[in-house]
Structure formats: structure tokens, C-alpha cells
Image (cartoon, rainbow, N blue to C red):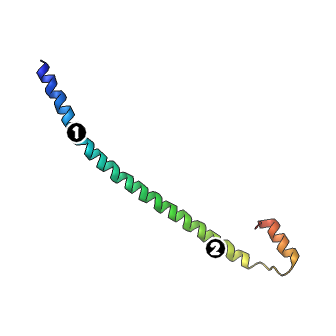
Amino acid sequence: MFNIFGKIKDLIIAALALAIPVIYVVARMRGKDAYKTQQLEDEVKTSKKVQDFYKNMANDETDNLTDRSSVTDRLRKNGL
């Protein structure tokens, strides 16, 4: 009777011993994919911020800053 349970236990241990490296490799591959995805999302966010910055700069260039009062008004409204 103990022999059957011993064999079952040995089979479970052997299955886990074979499964652990496979699980490790699969998890590592998924981790790399998640990291690459995160990097791409960060690059997209950065490019959108840069694009918005240049749009705002283009809009600010159309303002006439010919005298002191227009400069101070713009600084009070938008900041530096």
C-alpha cells in the first residue's frame, strides 16, 4: 500500500521538476514582452508631450510681444 503512494509522490515530484524550468522560461518571455510594451507606451507618451509642447510654442509665436505690458500680461496668464 505504501508503494503505490510512493510512486504517485515520485510522479508528482518528477512532473514538477520538469514543469518548473518550462514555467520559468514562459514567465521570462512574458516579462520581456511586458517590458517592451511598457517602453513603447512610454515613448508614445513622450512623443505626445513633445508634440504638444511644439504646438504650444507655435501658438505662442503668433502673440505680439512688442511692449512691456504685453510681456507681463502673457507671463501672468501663462507663467514662464
The image position of residue 18, as x and y in percent, is: 21, 41
Q: Is residue 16 above or below residue 60?
A: above
Residue bearing mark 2:
54
Residue at the location (38% across, 56% down)?
33
Alpha carbon distance from label 1 to label 2: 57 Å
* 70 relative to 14 in the view: left or right: right
User: Secondary structure beneath disc 1?
Assistant: helix
Residue at the location (19% across, 28% down)?
9
The image position of residue 23, as x and y in percent, is: 29, 45
Report the quarter where the N terminus lies. Answer: top left
The image position of residue 13, as x and y in percent, is: 21, 33
Crowdedness of circle 1 by 10 Å Cα count: few (<14), some, many (20+)? few
User: Secondary structure beneath disc 2?
Assistant: helix
The image position of residue 29, as x and y in percent, is: 33, 53
Residue at the location (38% across, 52% down)?
31
Identified by mark 1, the residue type is Ala
Q: Which mark is residue 17?
A: 1
Q: Is residue 17 above or below residue 59?
A: above
Q: Is residue 60 above or below residue 17?
A: below
Q: Which mark is residue 43?
A: none
* 37 relative to 11 in the view: left or right: right
Residue at the location (59% across, 69% down)?
50
Crowdedness of circle 2 by 10 Å Cα count: few (<14), some, many (20+)? few
Q: Nearer the viewer, mark 1 or mark 2?
A: 1
* 15 relative to 71 in the view: left or right: left
Q: Mark 1 or mark 2, which has the lower sequence index?
A: 1
Residue at the right extreme of this rendering = 69
